[in-house]
Image (cartoon, rainbow, N blue to C red):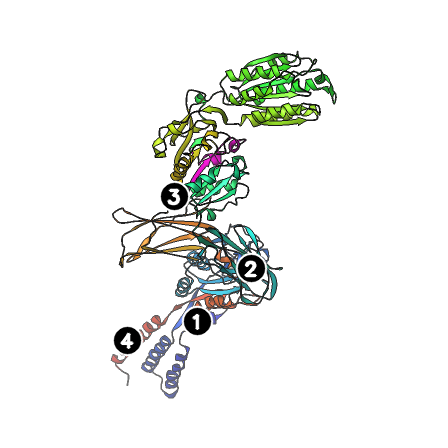
Amino acid sequence: MNGWLDLLRFAHPWALLLLLLPLAGLLRRRVRNWPLLLRLSVLTMLILALSGPGVGSQVETRWVYFLLDLSQSTRLADDPAGLLAQVRQLAVPRPHTRYGLIVFGRQPLIEQGFQPTISVREIHSTIDPLGSDIAAALELALDSFPAQGGKSVVLLSDGRSSGGELDQVLARARRQGVQISAWPLADIHSEYWIARLRAPRQVSQQMPFRLQVQLFANSYAQGTLVIYRDGRLLPQMRRKVKLSPGLNRFSFQDQLDQAGLYRYQAVLQVPGDSLAQNNKYTALVEARGGPQVLLISAKTPDESALPKLLAQAGYAYRQTTLRQWQPSAVGLLSYRAVILDNAPLSELNAEQIATLTGYVRDQGGGLLLIQGRSAVQGFENKQFERILPLSYEGPQELRLPPLALVLVLDRSGSMGEAAGGARKLDLLKQAALGTVSALAPRSLLGIIAFSVGHQWVLPLGQVPSRASLAQAIGKLTAGGGTDLYPALQAAIGALAKVQARVKHLIVFSDGKVAKVGKDFSRLFRQIRADGITASAIAIGPNADMQILQELQRAGQGKIYQVMDAHDLPRITLEELRRVVRNRWIQGNSPVLPGPAVGRLGPVAPANIPPLDGHVLTFPKPTSEVELITPGQGEQPDALVSYWRYGLGQVVVLNTDLAGEGSGAWVRWSGLSRLAAQLLGQVYSEEPPQLAQFKLQTHLSGGRLQATVEAQRGGRWLDQLKLKARLSQVGQAEIPLVFHQVAPGRYQASSGPLPQGVYLLQLQGVSAGGKDLGRLRRALSVPYPAEYQAIGLDQMALVHIAQQTGGRYLEGADKLPAQLLGHRVIYRKIWPELLLAGLALFLADLIARKLPQRS
C-alpha cells in the first residue's frame, strides 16, 4: 500500500458533498452547545455511511495463466522456443503477481504451476498437435485457479478451435470474473489446401461422371493438381492450376468400365506451400453391377481350367495376377469372393496379406485357395497361414521323415582336376559334408559315387554325424569314365522303397555321360511314377547338359551350371533349402470322402478321378475336412478343408487345376460342379439389405456421427438393437454404439478418427431378436480438422476477449495494467458509522432529558 489514499476508499464519493450541511450549520450558530454538536455529529455519521467507505485491509494476489497453442495450425509444435522466450518477456516479476503456463493441442496440460515468473525454456509435456481444443484449455485454467485472488488468462493462439463448447466456457469465466485476453499467433504465410473432393457415391459402369476438387489459397500461386485412382495416376487427371485467394474449383471427368469400389485421391503440389498434410483428399466411388469374384492367378493364368469352369457355373469374375493386383480393402468391398488360383504364395507381400485378412475377418468376405506345387514352393509365412483352415507343419507324431535325399556324385577322372588350388572332387566332398547341418534330424540321406561303376558311400538311412560322413567320403578318389545310368538306377530304386514326405535326388557331374545301351527315358518315367523329384548340378562347361536337363524336367526340380567349383558348397545348400521347403507330394492317389463331405452337396467323391499330386497340409482342430487322399503315413492327407474365420469363410483345395496334379480332373466332366460347390461355400450372397433403414453419416472434426431412421409401412420401428462395427484395415475395431433419440431414429458418435478408409457394418435386430438385415458402407476420413482451416481467426479471438472483459493484444509488447499487479481488498465500514451515529443519537436524547442550567 502506497499511502493513505490506498487505506480509504468511498463507493459513492459524491455523497461527501452533503458534509457541507453540518458544516454550514456549525458555522451559522454562534452558540455551540453540546446538543447542537451531538446532532451535527449524528448527521455527519449518516452522510459518511451513505458514501460507502471502505478501509484497506489486505493485498490480493493476481494469478495469470498463459495458454500456449501448440497445434499444427500455428506451426509452433516443432519449435516453440521463440514463443517461450516471448512469454518469459511478458511475465515480468511484480509484487503479488504469479504466472502459470498451460500448453495445449488436442488436449491441455499444465507445463508450469504458478511462480513469480515463467522459467520454462523447453516444452516437456507431450502434446497431440492434431487438434486445438481451446475450450478444454480454458476449462483446465478455470479449474486450477486458486480460490482467492484476481484471475486473468492470456490466450496465445490462432483462434482455430477444433473441439469443445467454447461459449459455455466463456460464460463460466464471465461468472467467475476471469478476464481472458487474446494474443494472436499467425505463422502461416503461403498456404494452399484441398478443402474437399466431391464425387458421386455410386455410378453406373461406362457412364461418365464428374469429380470436383475444391482448393483454398491465401495468396496467388501456380501449382499442379493430380488425381489418382486406386493408387494409379490417370493421365487425363493431371493439370496445371492457377490459384487465387479464396475458394478455387476444378472439375475432372472419368468413367469406370468394371464394377467395384474405387478410391480417388487428389494431390496438390504448390511451391512454397507451408503445410503438406492438407494437400491430399480421398473420395470413394462405387460402380454398380459386373463381376462379383476376383480371380488372382499365377503368372500364366491361361494354363488353369478355372476361368472356363467359373463361366460354366455362371460366375462373373475379374482376372488378374498376383503381381498385378494392387491390394485395396476398399476395392475388395464389391467382391463376394476372392480366389487365389495356384498363385505363388511366396510372392504375397505384407500389404496383400493384411488386405486379404481384413477382407475375410472383418468384412465377411470369402476366400478360395487353390494351391499346387508352384503355389507352395518356397512358401513360409505364418501370418497368411493364420487365416487358413490348415497348417503346413503338423504335430511331430504325425510327420513322416521330412526328406529322403540321395546325392549322386561324379568321381570320374576329370573330377581330379585342379580348380583354383583345390581339386574339384575335394570341393564336391565339402558340398556333401555341408548337407549334414542343412538336413532335419529325422531326414534320410544316401550317397552314391560313380565313374565306370558305382558304389554306395553312404547307404540311404538316418543322417550320420559329420565326422562319420567325412570318414566315409574321405576315401573317394577320382578316376575312370562317366557312367551315370547304373548309379541313377540304384538311387531311384532306393528312394522308391522308403517313406518320406519328399523324395529327392541330386546328380553332380562334369562330363559327357555314357548313353550307348542306356534307356534313360525309362528311368525318367520311373522317377515321375514314384513321385521322386530330381535336380542336377553341372560342373564346368563340359557337363552333359542334355541328360541333366531331361533329368531335371522329369523330376520337376532345378538345374544349376557351376563354372567355378568353389561354388559347389553354396549351390548345394541353396538347393537343399529349396527342397526342404517343398510340400508337394507327387504320385497317383485316390480321392476319398472326409468327415464334412456333406458340404459338397450333390458331388459324389466316388466319381472324382484320382490325383497326380497334392500339397501336404495338416487341418487345424476347428476346420472341417471335406475330401481326403491316402497319406504316406497312418493318417490321410486333407484335400479340401473349410472353416469360418472372423466374419468370413475360407476353403482350401490342396492341388492345382492346371493339370500338374490334376490331369484326370481337367478331363472330368464333373469338375465344373465341384468348382461351383467349392466357390459356393465362400461366396457371400448379398445380405438382406435394410431397405426400411436409412443411414446417414456425417464427419466433423475427424469424428463420425451416424444416424439411422427405421420405418416399415409408414410406421417407425422402435426399440431396435443396432449392432455396428467400425474398422480400418489391419486396425482394432472402433466402438460405435447406437442409441434411440426419437421415434424410429438412432444415433451413434465416434471419437476422433485418424485419416484413412473405414468400413461401417450395420446389422439390425428387432426387439424380438429377428435379424432385419445388414448394411455396409465405406467411409473416407480426411486429414485432421486442424489442417482444414489455416491462418489467423481474428474474429474468434476478439469474441473470446470481449465476452470476458479482456483485450485483444495484437502488436502489444507488454501485458496491460489491468491484467497485472496486486489489488487492495477494502473492508466496508458503513455499519460501524451507522452504529456510531446511533450512539450519538441516543446520547442526544439523554442530553435532552438532563436538567438545563439557567
Q: Check disc 1 and give the amino acid type.
A: Leu
Task: Please tell me in which quadrant of the rendered image residue 408 appears.
Answer: top right
Residue picked out by circle 4: 842
Residue 87: assigned label? 2
Residue at the image position 56 percent from the left and 26 percent from the top = 579
Secondary structure under tag 1 reads strand
Taking 338 as reference, is 243 above or below it?
A: below
- The segment highlighted magenta reads 363-388
Residue 684: assigned label? 3
Nearer the camera: disc 1 or disc 4: 1
Secondary structure under tag 2 reads helix
Can residue 106 be spotted in the picture? no
Residue at the image position 37 percent from the left and 45 percent from the top = 685
Instruction: Give whichever of discs 4 and 3 has the lower sequence position.
Output: 3
Residue picked out by circle 1: 8
Instruction: Give whichever of discs 3 and 1 has the lower sequence position.
Output: 1
Task: Please tell me in which quadrant of the rendered image residue 136 appears.
Answer: bottom left
Q: Check disc 4 and give the amino acid type.
A: Leu
Instruction: Please tell me how crowded label 3 is: few (under 14), some (14-19), or many (20+) other residues with Cα within 10 Å.
Output: some
